[in-house]
Image (cartoon, grey):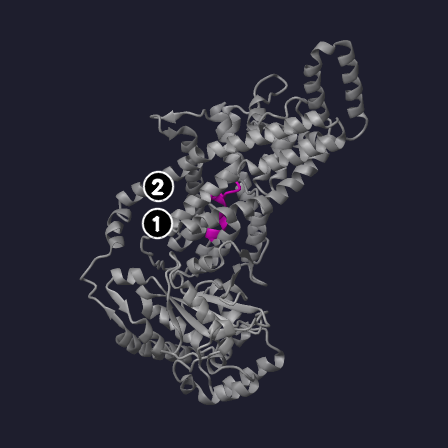
Amino acid sequence: MCRIKEIKFADIQPLAKSIQIALLGNPNSGKSSLFNLLTGLRQKVGNFPGVTVERKTGTFSLVNKDLCTVIDLPGTYSLYPRRADEWVSYKELMSPESKQKVDLAIVVADASNLRRNLLYVSQVIDLKIPIVVALTMTDLAKKRGIVVDVNGLSREMQVPVIMLNARTGKGLDQLKSTISQLIISEHVGPDFFDIENLAENAITEMKELIPGISNYSSIHHMINHEQFELSNDLQVGIEEIEKKYKFNPTKVQAEDIQQRYQKIRTIMQKTVHEDSPEKKKLFSEKLDHFFLHRTWGYMIMGVVLFILFQCVFWIADYPMKFIESIVGVLGSWLGSQLTEEWFSDLLINGVLAGVGGIMVFVPQIMILFALITLLEDTGYMARISFLTDRIMRKVGLNGKSVMPMIGGFACAVPAILSARNIENKKERLITILVTPFMSCSARLPVFTILTSLIIPKTYLFGVFSLQGLIMMSLYVFGVFIAMVVAYILNIFIKIKEKSFFILELPVYRQPRWKNIVITMVEKAKVFVFDAGKIIMIISLILWGLSSFGPGNNREHIVDNYKTQVKNDPIHKRQYDIQKANLLLESSYAGYMGRIIEPVISPLGYDWKIGIALISSFAAREVFIGTMATLYSVGEGADETSISLRDKMQAARKKDGTPVYTRATGFSLLIFYLLAMQCMSTLAVVKRETGSWKWPIIQLLYMTGLAYIISLFVYQVFS
């Protein structure tokens, strides 16, 4: 076993510098589980500088109370990157572009797929940074008849190897102790193998050109120096070395991988005992006979998705009602305590209405992401990708498009970014163009309130929620439209390029309940603080547009109201409601709504809905805040305790008919399902395609399609 100088923790002095730790590993190796275990809720999510790949950072304390910052780098199979996320990990380790030097690397290795994982471990070793290997999935390895000699593996690899269970936390203290010792001793092991044999003279000159660089980094700088932000002199110097020694990147890469695997095979023969694959079938393989069956698999998938949407309504109903009642009571109390001044109106009908429109849907957001995380954690989400690959191929796509489209159910922006993993240009473009049809979480509040307005709260057979069935139908219809559009785009976009779909199915596992709770909290925070900011800002702007208007028309309405109340005080409440509605219609918001009303009236929408359509282009969920503000400003003084749902239910046109009929409700649901109501999505499409051509086409065809189908739906149900 690799020997590290023994240090008593009582003697370890506080470190003078901030400790930067990179968390590395293959995809599905348990890296995210270890990150959550180390950092808990002390996490931040952002983007890596200059790219839109997600960056997760967190902090944890060592034995001596020193604070470490850990960066969860995207999973990669080797230091020869192909995808955008692999380039992020590569540059963070290799390139001068990295802002902060990595002090230590934790490389997570899956014991059940050790040969493939050790390739990446061996490459990181040769970068000459302190490294500790966290060996995960050892329980799964035992089920497969694989027994790893951890001490022997550490000895052969010449780096510390810690057996870790990220679910129970077993081995975490030993991992932290080892990190402390490595940081103090700055231990770096020898080269995994003699890399100089691949290009000895070239490596020697590279180390003279860039002092302090390792042998392996020299190789990589010659292969990928164009991707690094180096000075012109360095770029020219590296080019001259390549030409001088006829450096062949493809040949060197192939020999590097081959020689590493040869040594890894020898190491595994010494340290890993593996039973015959025929000796025992895994439980996961037996389950897949049912879950991936050509017939039963699709039926099971349908049942799983059906239960998911039923739970979103059933479980969230109680906390949503509680939040609605709290907001209503608070609004009523403020209305009775404050004088009738503009700032009182701003507080109640602007701020409180906006906050209520945000908070009431937090339970559904949390429940939806909890269930999605549950599917991912158990391994079933990958099975959904596998099953849908057969469908994708019929419309010109393949299974690689499934993951971005599934991600679109959460948010189209990161989903479109994840389409970078699709090598085929045509399939990637089509995937980007149809992914926004997936019903993202921003649509969920809109779907919820509209469904509750037009669909009675009844249960089929006393169990299945009719509202939940309608909700599921919307999601399924969005997928269907995406498939139809993909089929049409596949005909018109002429790019001939073969593609392949390779998916590693993770084993079925018991869900990590702590991870689910962390995800629920994080997604709720994102909704409240990110989307909530937009909703609040637009709610306050709408309050201003709804509370003020051009000319003296509003003053005449107030004067006329005072005269009516003076002459007929018995009907003051009725005059209050009439005054509020007339003031709203004569406001700036009212005039804006009247301008666009002729365009949207064929769909069954009034001018208030028109304003919501415009404002929600910033973010779809703003629809709720807009409705809350408009109906709060336009209501009587005694109506502040009524929920938004009840206000919309009671809304009437001038002829006395309900605004939200079944025809209008279904039409509005279809419009929000299909229309491109998200400027953030258009921005990221422009970035990913490199042109405004495709986002403009996407905006026009999605909005046009939404208008036509919504018009058809309204006519059918009228």
Residue 432 pos. (x, y %): 49, 52
- Name the residue located 62 percent from the left edge and 30 percent from the top edge: 330
Q: What is the crowding at mark 1: few (fewer than 14 residues within 10 Å), some, or many (at least 20)?
A: many
| Amino acid at dot 1 | Tyr
Q: What is the crowding at mark 2: few (fewer than 14 residues within 10 Å), some, or many (at least 20)?
A: some
149, above or below 410, in the image: below
Residue 322, magenta (yes or no): no
- Please indicate, yes or no, whether residue 491 appears anywhere in the rendered image: no
Residue 439, magenta (yes or no): yes
Single out the residue that lies furthest toward the front: 10
| Amino acid at dot 2 | Val
Number of marks drawn = 2
**Element under label 1?**
helix
What are the residue bounds of the magenta stretch? 430-443
Residue 260, which numbered label?
A: none
3, above or below 639, in the image: below
**Residue position marked by numbered label 1 in the rendering:** 380
Residue 6 pos. (x, y %): 44, 77
Q: Nearer the viewer, residue 558 or 314?
A: 314
**Residue position marked by numbered label 2 in the rendering:** 304
- Please indicate, yes or no, whether residue 625 appears anywhere in the rendered image: yes
**Element under label 2?**
helix
- Name the residue located 61 percent from the left edge and 17 percent from the top edge: 655
Q: Which of 386 and 639 is in front in this view?
A: 639
Residue 556 pos. (x, y %): 80, 21
Residue 685 pos. (x, y %): 55, 53
Quadrant of the rendering where the N terminus is positioned:
bottom left
State yes or no: discs 1 and 2 in contact (Cβ < 8 Å).
yes
